[in-house]
Amino acid sequence: MDPKRSLDSMGSAPTRRIVLVHGFTQTAACWSPVDDALAADHDVHAIDAPGHGIAADAALDLPTGGRIITVAGGHGAYIGYSMGARFVLHSALAAPDHVERLVLISGTAGIEDTGERAARRASDEALADRIETIGVPAFLDEWLALPLFAGLPPERAHRAEREANTAAGLSSSLRLAGTGTQQPLWDRLPDLAMPVLVVAGAEDPKFTAIGQRMVDAIGPNAEFAVIEGAGHTVHLEQPERFLAALLPWLART
């Protein structure tokens, strides 16, 4: 996707709006190769999350960022990946009148154990310090080498788009909207009354287990799609299989 069109309508004959929110270190331009397929039948808006892209100076926590995202996105289906999934989950809980449908890719409702959450917060703080020390390009070398992204093809890693981010923006994102800062939302998941699709990669057992638990907690309006051959970056590792699960669900709901 052309980053200049990140907040523009992409479909020539849109029927419903889709709002896309990316993951950590990405930007609104990182939704290829699935954005064009979505734009064929929808009015697609990809949004730069707080601390990223043109929103690099927006230092916002998850609840505030979730509300701001709905202001920018308007009414429609909200699709978020990883960090973006956590943002749009907050959006859906805070502004259910805006979020007509919700898709959570490799997302979580938070860490319940206070000790584990504190440890993750410390880890996020250390990563923020690391970005500020070595800069974005060197940090991306380390970030994309993590086992979490082992299945991500280099040609779909959107390295150039990620390098457009700033060290200050990414570090503020970790400190304010990292998983360690997220208050657990498990007890609020039954409040989600809109259709929800939870997506996880079959080769990402941690988030497959989290995804199943989220679907069980939400209730009968939630569905779970496990994408074979995909790890954490489901939509980039297996775009055809991801779309094969997503597009029929969008049509039905």
Image: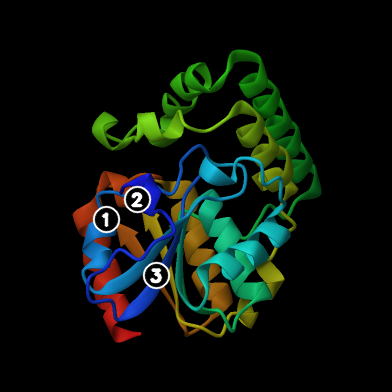
Report the front residue among 148 and 162. Answer: 162
Question: Exactly how many numbered labels are in the figure?
Answer: 3
Report how far apart the C-alphas of labels 2 and 3 lie in the structure.
Answer: 12 Å
Residue identifier under label 3: 18
Badge 3: few (under 14), some or many (20 or more) residues near its Cα, within 10 Å? Answer: many
Q: Position of residue 249 (x, y in %)?
A: 31, 77
Identity, as a three-letter code, of the amino acid under mark 1: Val
Identity, as a three-letter code, of the amino acid under mark 3: Ile
Q: Is residue 108 visible?
A: no
Secondary element at image label 3: strand
Label ID, residue 31: 2
Residue 2, compared with residue 75, is above or below; it is above
Please say if the residues under marks 2 and 1 sit with CB atoms less than 8 Å apart.
Answer: yes
The first of marks 2 and 3 along the sequence is: 3
Identity, as a three-letter code, of the amino acid under mark 2: Trp
The residue positioned 32% from the left and 47% from the top of the image is 2
The residue positioned 34% from the left and 35% from the top of the image is 158
Relative placement, left or right, of 174 versus 162 is right
The residue positioned 48% from the left and 85% from the top of the image is 220
Q: Position of residue 23 (x, y in %)?
A: 49, 46
Report the front residue among 252 and 226. Answer: 252
